[in-house]
Image (cartoon, helix red, strand yellow):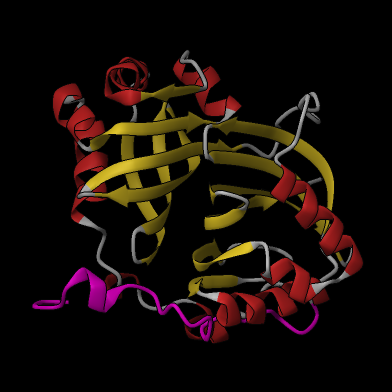
Amino acid sequence: MPGQSVAEAIAPTDGQNLQISQDGRTVPETNLAEVMTAMDSTPIDPTIQAHLDSLSAGDLDLLADTYHPEAILILNKPLARISQATGSATGRADIKSLLQRQIDAGTKFLELRDYVQGKDLAIVRSTLMIGGLPRDFFAYYLLRDGKIWRHIAGIYESGEPGESAMPAAFHPVFMEQMGLLAGGDIDGLARTYDPDAIWVWAATNSPIARVRGASQGYQPIRHYLGKYVKLNMQMVGLKEYTQIGDTLFVQAIMTARGMSEHASGAYVFAGNKIWRQASSCGPRAA
C-alpha cells in the first residue's frame, strides 16, 4: 500500500485472524478472506526482498550482505541435498559459502504464495526453481539491526523418505511442550513462552486446519493454543530435528481427524522460554 510502513501493514499480532474449520478440513474458498489478508496488504520487508532478489540474480556479495555478522542459517535435508550444501552455517563467512552452493544450483524465485510478518519475525511461502525443477519452498526469517539474524529454509517434498534418526538429546522446553500437549495443559503450554514472545504461522494450505497470522504475548498465544489443542494434533513421524545454539528447527508428519500433513517449525529460545516461533505446513502426507 503506498505510503504505508511495514510496521503498519504487518499481519495483526492479536490472533484474531485465526480460523480453524469446524470439521478440521480446508476452509472453503468462499471464506478465504477470513483466514488470510490480501497479499498486497503485507509488503515484504526490504531486507527479505533484497535477499530473494539477490539470490535469484546470483549476486553472492549482495546476498551475503543481507545477513547479520552473527547469523545462523539452517537448511532442511531436501534443500541441502539438492544444493549439495551443508545443512547449517554460522557467521557471514560460512554462510557465504553455503549460499554459493544455492546459487550454483540455479535457485530462482518464481512465485510468492504467502507472506506473514509479526514485527521482526516473518514467514515466506513460495515456489522456487532449484536444480531445474519448481520446488515448494518455505523460509523463516528473524531480523536484527536490518539484517537476517536467524534464517531457516527448506522445501517440502511429498515423496520424502521416512523418519529421521532420533537426536541424542532434545531441548528441555521442546520436551516439556510435548508432555503438556499430550495432557492438553493450555496454561502450562502458554507458560513455556517468554512474556514478549511472538508466534507467526502460515498454514493456509493445510488439509487439517487453515490458519494465518501472528500473536504476541501470553494471552494471545494462549488463545491460539486453546484452539490448537482442540485439534488433538499428533506427531506421527519426526523427519528433522536440528539445533544450532539458541535456534531449533523441527520438521514432522502431523495428523489429526484422519488426515496427515508435512509441517515444520522454528524456535528461538531466550533462556528456558520460547522467544520466537514460526510454523508452516506443506503438502498432505500419505
Q: Is 121 contained in the magenta span?
A: no
Which residues, given as a range, are shown in magenta? 1-23
Give how far across and how far down residue 110 sits, in percent: 33, 44
Give how far across and how far down residue 255 sits, in percent: 83, 56
Identified at 81% across, 45% down, the residue is: 286
Give how far across and how far down residue 28 sits, in percent: 63, 80
Check the image and report above or below for 71 versus 139.
above
Magenta span dominant secondary structure: loop
Identified at 60% across, 74% down, the residue is: 221
Marks counted in the figure total 0
Q: Is residue 79 left or right of residue 111?
A: right
Check the image and report above or below for 204 versus 247.
below
As rendered, which of 166 and 138 lies closer to the eye?
166
Identified at 68% across, 68% down, the residue is: 191
Check the image and report above or below for 259 versus 282.
below
Residue 90 visible in the snapshot = yes
Q: Is 8 contained in the magenta span?
A: yes
**Extreme front residue here?**
271
Give how far across and how far down residue 96 sits, in percent: 28, 20
As rendered, which of 124 and 93 lies closer to the eye?
93
Q: Quadrant of residue 277?
A: bottom right
Residue 259 visible in the snapshot = no
Identified at 79% across, 23% down, the residue is: 165
Q: Quadrant of residue 72?
A: top left
Check the image and report above or below for 206 versus 218.
above
- Quadrant for the N terminus, please: bottom left
As rendered, which of 136 and 154 lies closer to the eye?
154
